[in-house]
Every structure is written in C-alpha cells, then in structure tokens.
Amino acid sequence: MSSEETLKRLALETLEQDADRIVQLIRVQMDNLTMPQCPVYEEVLDTQMFGLSKEIHFAVRLGLIDREHGRSILADLEKQVSDVHEAYYEHREQLKKANK
Amino acid sequence: MSSEETLKRLALETLEQDADRIVQLIRVQMDNLTMPQCPVYEEVLDTQMFGLSKEIHFAVRLGLIDREHGRSILADLEKQVSDVHEAYYEHREQLKKANK
C-alpha cells in the first residue's frame, strides 16, 4: 500500500474515531441525566461538532477524503446524536409512567 | 517529491493559511474598532483558535507535522493576536490624547 493510501486510511479512521468520541460524550451526558436543554450541554455539543467539521474540512482540502464522504460522516454523527436524544426522552417518559 | 512530502507541505501551508486568516479577522475587528473586551469578540477568537488547534492536532496524529511545529504555529498566532491588540490600544490612546 502506498504511503498516500495509508494516510488516507489513517485520516478516515481518525475522523471516525473522533465522531465516535462525540457520540460517547453525548451518551455519558444522557446517562448522567444531564438535560439536553441545558445551554452548557448545547454549547459543548456545538463546539465538538465544529471541531470535527474543521478536521473534516482540513482532510478534504488535503485530498485525503472526498467532500461527499466528509459530509456523510457529519450527517451520520448528527443522526446518532439525535437517536441518543430520542432514547433519552423515551426512557424519561417511561420513568414518569412507572412513578405514577 | 514523493506524494507524502507533497502532503506534508500542503498540510503546513493550509495550517499557516488558516492562522493568517485568524490574524486578518482580528485586524478587521480592530479596524472597525470593535472592542476586544466584547464577549462576542472573545468567543469568536476562542472558537477560531479552537478550530485551528483541532486541525493542527489532526495533522500531528497523521504524522504530517510534528508536535513541536504544531505548538509553534499556535504560539506564533497568539503572539500576532497580542501584537494586534497592543497596536489597537496604543492607537486608541493616541486618539484620546489628540482629542484633548
């Protein structure tokens, strides 16, 4: 494998790792029942998403990943974050019912 | 030149370009006499610095630049931002004296 291919693979793995880390961060927040409406939470999530989008844009400019792939990493992450949010709300609803 | 060397050079040029862009942004803010004490200004600067540090860290992890070089890009930028701030305050002091 050429060094360029190795770099491209490494770039992709690194970006996906970072996206996973953001999902983990969100999960930990949800598990600790920190409210997603909390402004600090929103800010942390926005900052992390901004950081990842900077990395992706940088990788695209270097030709290490194509623009479309970069977009799909961010879109997948947004989907996962929204799934975690939904699971959190559902869980909260169930707790409310159980406590009635 | 090997494709890896080309990539390393491109990575460095891209990071330096981004650092320059932040300095330009600060200059424009100062020229428009936006106060550096303004919280929105601080936030914009912090966000931009955070974005650049993410790009640098990403490039370091890919082995495109070494850690030390990455640090020096950020340190240079901080120095330049502080120079622009100082020039702004001096200019303001001179305006005050001229208006007396």
Image (cartoon, coloured by chain):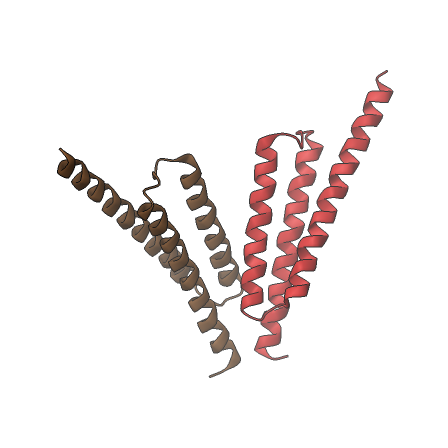
Chain colours: A brown, B red
* Residue at the far front in the pictured view: A99
Q: Is residue B66 above or below residue B83?
A: below
Q: Is residue A68 above or below residue A35?
A: below
Instruction: Please state the horizontal and vertical placement of residue A35, each as a whole percent of the image.
Output: 34, 38
Identify the residue at horizontal 58%, vertical 54% (top origin). B53
**Of B36 and A30, which appears nearest the observer?**
A30
Q: Is residue B59 left or right of residue B98?
A: left
Give the quadrant of residue B62: bottom right
Q: Is residue A42 left or right of residue B77?
A: left
Instruction: Please state the horizontal and vertical placement of residue A55, each as a whole percent of the image.
Output: 50, 58
Give the quadrant of residue B64: bottom right
Instruction: Please state the horizontal and vertical placement of residue B74, each as a whole percent of the image.
Output: 66, 54
Instruction: Please state the horizontal and vertical placement of residue A13, each as a whole percent of the image.
Output: 42, 68
Identify the residue at horizontal 32%, vertical 50% (top origin). A81
| Count of numbered circles in the view | 0
**Of A3 and B78, which appears nearest the observer?**
B78
Give the quadrant of residue B15: bottom right
**Of B2 and A41, which appears nearest the observer?**
A41
Identify the residue at horizontal 36%, vertical 46% (top origin). A29
Identify the residue at horizontal 26%, vertical 50% (top origin). A83
Viewport quadrant of the C terminus of chain A: top left
